[in-house]
Image: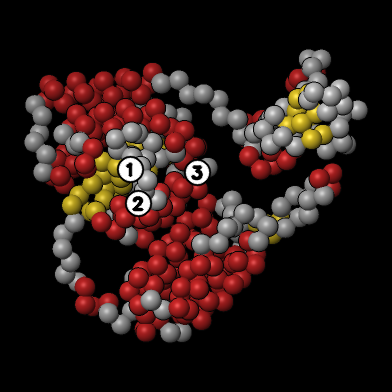
Amino acid sequence: MKDDLIRLIDQIDTIESKFHRSPSSPGLCVPSVDEIYDIPEFTLWIQRVQMELQDIVDRTGDQFVGGALEVSQANYDGWNDRKYFEALKGKLLAMRDNLDKYYADDGRHAMQERKSPKIFISHSSRDKEYVSKLVELLDGMGLDQTRIFCSSLPGYDIPIDTNIFDHLRNQFLSYDLHVFFIHSKNYYQSAVSLNEMGAAWALKTEYSSLLLPGFGFGEMAGVVNSQAIAIKLDNDEVEVKDKLNQLYAKLIEEFGLTRKTDIIWEQKRDRFIREVKEIVVPIDETPEAHGDDVEMLESGLLIRKSEADAGKTIYYCPACYQKEGKLFPIVKGSMARDHFCSNCRGHYTLR
C-alpha cells in the first residue's frame, strides 16, 4: 500500500550505506567493485519494493512503474549492483512525487472475499530433514497436503510443469497464509528464503518462528520479532512443550480443527521433540566453515593449510570457491600436464 512504499523509499539512503567494496583478486584479474547483493537487509528491502511495484503494475498497468519493477528484478550479483541500484533509486524518487496517481483506488477494495487459510513453510532446502518432522506433526494435528505448502517435500510442493516463482507468488496472493519461518544459518544464506520473508512482511501475513537446534534468538534478523510465537527447538523441554501447545491451540482456532485428546496430542508432540533432537546435521562447507584454513598461492590456486601441514598437497579451484563458497579439487586429465577443476572443468597448469 501507499504508506508501505513511502517507508521503503525513505529507506533508500540507509540501504545504500550497506554497499561495500569486494576484494580484488590480482591473480585472477578480478577488479574490486561495489557490492550489496550479499547483504540480508538489502535482500529483504528489494523484495518488499518488488511486491509494492508489482501491486501497482497489476492494478494500473503503468509503464513507468513497470520499468522500475524490471530494474528491481535485475540480477544483482555484485558486478552491476551499483548501476542497477542507482537506476532504481532514481525511478523510486520520481514516483514518490506522484504516488497519489498510483493509489487512487485504495479505498475501493476494503471488503474482500475471505481467503482459505493455509500454512506456508519458509525454509532452506538444506533443513529438509527437520521440516519433514514438522510436517508430520502438522499432519497429526489434522492438517493435510491441501492446507500445507512445503517446497522441499513431495506432495506438498510445486506441481510439475508449473513455473516456480509464479506458484510461490500465487500462494501469497490466493491464500490467507500462516507462514512458518524455519530459522537456521542455512535459512539466512538462502536468497529464496529471504525473498519469502520479505513477501510475508509486505502482505502482513500471520507467522510463527521455529529455531532449529544450534541457532539462537540473538541470530534472528529481518522482519521477525519476539512478539509472535517463537520456538527454539533445543531449549528446555518443558518450555518447548508449552510453546508447541500454544501453537496447536492457535492453529485449531485458525483452521477450525478438531482438538485431539490430550494423550494423543502429547504423544505426537513428544515424538516430534525427540526425533528433532536425534537429527545429525552434516558439516556445511562454506567459506566461513573453512575460516583461515584456506590459503591462496602466488599462482592463484588454493590449498588447505591443514592438508599441507600433514604432507598432502591438494589444489583447489579459486573460481568455484569465490562463486559457490566450496572447495573443488583440481584433478588430472588424460595428459600428464592436463589438469582441470572437478566442478567447472576449468583448465589449470600445475608446476
Q: How far, Cα to Cα, is label 2 from label 1?
A: 9 Å
The answer to whether one can see residue 225 in this image is no
Q: Which-is-in-front pick, marks 2 and 3?
A: 2
Residue on which the image places disc 2: 167
Q: Nearer the viewer, residue 151 or 100?
A: 151
Percent across and percent down for residue 94 are: 51, 81
Q: Residues within 10 Å of mark 3 (few under 14, many from 20)?
A: some
Looking at the picture, the colour scheme in use is: secondary structure
Percent across and percent down for residue 305 are: 77, 25
- Determine the image quadrant of residue 259: top left
Q: Nearer the viewer, residue 180 or 241?
A: 180
Q: Which-is-in-front pick, marks 3 and 1?
A: 1
Q: Which residue lies most toward the top here?
A: 310
Q: Residue at x 37, y 46 (%)?
A: 161
Of mark 3 and mark 1, the one earlier in the sequence is: 1
Q: Residues within 10 Å of mark 1 (few under 14, many from 20)?
A: few
Q: Nearer the viewer, residue 155 or 32?
A: 155
Q: Amino acid at mark 3?
A: Ser
- The answer to whether 214 appears left or right of 19 in the picture is left
Residue on which the image places disc 1: 159
Q: Residue at x 32, y 60 (%)?
A: 203
Q: Residue at x 87, y 36 (%)?
A: 299
Q: Amino acid at mark 2?
A: His
Percent across and percent down for residue 27 are: 84, 44
Q: Quadrant of the N terminus?
A: bottom left
Q: Nearer the viewer, residue 145 or 308?
A: 145
Answer above or below: position of 246 versus 164.
above
Q: Which-is-in-front pick, marks 2 and 1?
A: 1
The answer to whether one can see residue 86 in this image is yes
Residue on which the image places disc 3: 190
Q: Quadrant of the C terminus?
A: top right
